[in-house]
Amino acid sequence: MFELPLVRNTKRVRTVRKLRYQYINTLYQEYRRVQSSATANSTLPTPENSAAEEASDGDHDSADATSRRRRRKRRLLSVLGHAETDTDLSDAEAEEGNDDAEQADSEKEFFTRHEKPQETFEVWNTDRQKTVPMNTSTLSYDTCKQIERRAQKRLSAGMGHISKNADQHFRAMRDGYEIVAETPESHHLAHITQLNELLHVNIMKGRWDIAYRCFSILIRLPGVDIRSMWGPGARILRELSSTDKGLGTSEEFLGWLSGIYSSRSNFNQAMNFLMDPVFRCGSKTHTAKFVVAWLWELLFASCPDGTEHFSEEDPSNRKLLRLIERLSEMVLIPPYMEDPEIWFIFAVCHLVSADQLSQRFISTKSRTSELERDISRNQVTQHITNAHNCIRTCETKKGDFSFPRRIIEEQLACFEKRLYQNNDDLTASDPESEFGLGNEQENLDTQNVLGPGMSSMIDEEDNFFGSAEQVHFGFDSDSST
Amino acid sequence: MSTFFRGPVCGTDNCRSRLWRIIDGRRTCQYGHVMEGDVEFNDDEDDINSMGVITRRLNLTTNATGSFRSSMSSQSQLNQKEDANQKVYGVEGERLFLRCFQHILKLQCTWLVEHQNFPPVFADVVKLMWMRFLKSLEVADRRPTAGDDSENTSTEILERKPRLSLLSSICLLYMANTHLRVPIHSCDYIRWICSMELVYFKANLHLPAPWRKQLPNYYHQILEGGKTPSEGQFFHKLAHMCSVVQVSSCFSSYVSYEALTLKLLFAVKLPPQILFDVKELITISGDDDSSFCLYENHRERVQRLYLCADLRVAAYFILAVRYKILQNDPFFVNYCLAWLEVEGFEDSPATTEDLVTKLSHDAASLPQNNHHPWSDQQTTDYLDWMEKHFLPASTKTQTETQTIDHRIASKKLYSMFPLDRAPAENAEGGATRPSYVDKIQETYLEISDALAHGVRVPRQEQTPKLAQLTEARLLREISYRFAVSQPQLRECLAHLQTRICKTRNSTNCAS
């Protein structure tokens, strides 16, 4: 019923997979042949459609493309007069070309025409401008059957030696049937299936104790990949770790995952199939989801409750500082560098610390010395600047990550206002700080702060994240000012 | 001779070469330009680093006697790595496989003697059987080579494949205990292997490490157990093994049907009187002791499963129940009505082992098992079993194969998810868990309660329907215990029925 947290890579699966892509590709080729002959008769070649065809040719028939590339290379070499002189080179090149031809397997060919699954994972293209008109050209039943028959014929040569089971699977798939979940092959697998089912059922029922037991047994079994089941684990720990001190916290668990499974490797589509790639682990181009989850969780944990007032020795403050430090290191390396969500988290971190620091101006203004106040004022400004920077970077990154920018900027303005108000009070009592104040104001001006009138614009997007933070920021600052 | 490696574009005289080689210690591009300048030396070093020179850090640790051991251990590790790749194939591999099989057989015997109180002589009998089996391989081998030279026989090349699976080991055990008249039957063995108490699934992990490394993968597959036996695989194998070992020639092969009937009786919770009815039925049908012997079959598959003693007894048992109902015995009909009424008993076998056996069998045979929602007690039982039997059995050698980083990581993970989270709670649960006898008593009590409360007046015409229902349920209950499918058991039933009819007719004619 539920997906198994195992990578099942049997020979049958591999064969059928290969056949599937081969079949699709041959179908596509046949279809193109039929279409092109049809279109050639109907319309004269225009510069537009011939250009499009050429472009698509280059894209699609990678085998063709490689051969063409090789031809061009050889021609270039002959022009330069080096083709015959250096056998080593031509050997090496030929080898490379061969490799390409081998590697240009049907799957790769397929994916040159389509978006790769890891790129479309949880990407919802709702933009109307990006819509593509539907392909309205029709095909007669007869032609369709003919194409199918031809593709089958071409494929049948390679299907002579595959097992009966694989053949059946392939036939079923080709005819459009879905294969029901297979019975688990071995005793071992049968029980892992059962355990997995118990885990999910008990999570749904909210029986965390039993779910915990299932999970703790499951992760100890060989062959079970924790990367495909960390979600339930983190959830279970969040439920149970508050009552039971013997367990780790979900924060620790996610931290462990982020530490163990690096995202420095390139994601190889051909190796890691059967699993949803991005959700499962990270790569050089994708941030692993558990890393994001971990950062959010760290951020939540480092936010103060709001009731107690700020102090240097506050553990949450230290946590926040450590988190900011970690993030500043993370955004220097590839997958996180390009991820807008990481930048957004970074911005929120700065926002929270600016909030905490600026609160000091309201609550304990009489007790702090002038020097301390100066230092913290600088800190606040720094954090606010950083937050602005991060948000700007976040927006420049690709990917449609949307967030209520206006609200955040308003918050930042609010924090700055705190400083300003305090300084107003202080200037009345303490003329010595005027110099510093002037600087501050200049700073404020350069940062293009939104006016206080903006606060009325807080709209229904307030609950955009559904998180406690958002509420906490808004009301906390409102009540305190 | 020379090997090129890629580097920066040469650029001398617009040279576009990127390939370099070292001639006389100088980097020379493919068209003969020599790379020059001190600056290149730095680059050179970097390049060499990036080209895969491995730097090592010596972690010097001391052993118990205080001497450094890092280099020693690394050397031994290298040696081990070489050994790991040395799989043994061919005749050697086959011999190793037989040795491994023997090892597993020994483990199984030890477990039976230690945990199930088998007589110590049991191991000897199994050994005798095993020797006979090996001998049969040799005999089969000699026959074709007898015409040729006698050299081949001396080198003991096994030309015939032994065709062993782990089920063969169970067959040997069963044959031995039948010879010793130990009241253990196929259903017990199937229960033990499914609940992983007897070494069966993942048996390859129990082998000594050097053997495990040398054994080819296809033999590993055999010794892993794979699927749960189903569709009467066990009985096919048993009959074949019996004929190979030639049990009937020098061993006692009589299966005591009384013990098996009693066992079935308690398993399905029918009144004990049935035992006598079964015995009577067997005498009426004209079967004597000889028809409850281990069936021998030289083929791989048994066409007539009713010849297997265990299944025959099971079929007689179901038949007896059917006839009893059709006789319209008032007590028994009432009992069966109550028995059918008691809810949930079918889905909740009395013991964890039964539960696991049923689950394994269902998973192996049914294409899509409809999952009954388990009760809390069942879930806990199952998880306990997972923890106590399944987990240790499947992770037996895991730590050996892991690297040290892997081990540290998993240790950290496991400390976040400790297994025994609340020991106090567990102990309490263990204390309150009813024993096997308690559970059986409870079920019988439940049925008798149902008997006492509801007063049923069974009508004449309802009895065939009742017999059908009871039979269907018995088939479901019994088939998984013997790892046969329901149609197979039904077939046995049908055969015995026609047989009994025939004997009745003949006796009627004679009288």
Image (cartoon, coloured by chain):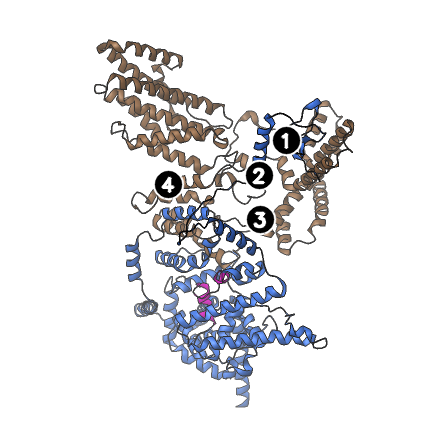
- The residue where tag 3 is placed is A178
Rendered colour, chain A = brown
- Mark 3 is on which residue type? Glu
Badge 3: chain ID:
A
Same chain shared by disc 4 and disc 1: no
Give the answer, above or below, for where A276 lies relative to A83: below
Same chain shared by disc 1 and disc 2: yes
Mark drawn on residue A340: none
Q: Is residue B418 visible?
A: yes
| Magenta stretch contains residue B178 | no
Badge 1: chain ID:
B
Where residue B388 sits in the image (x, y, percent)? 39, 59
- The residue where tag 4 is placed is A252
**Does the residue at mark 4 contact the one at mark 2 (Cβ under 8 Å)?**
no
Instruction: Specify few, some or many for label 1: CA neighbours under 10 Å numbering under 14, 14-19, or 20 or more.
Output: some
- The residue where tag 2 is placed is B52
Badge 2: chain ID:
B
Quadrant hosting residue A480: top left
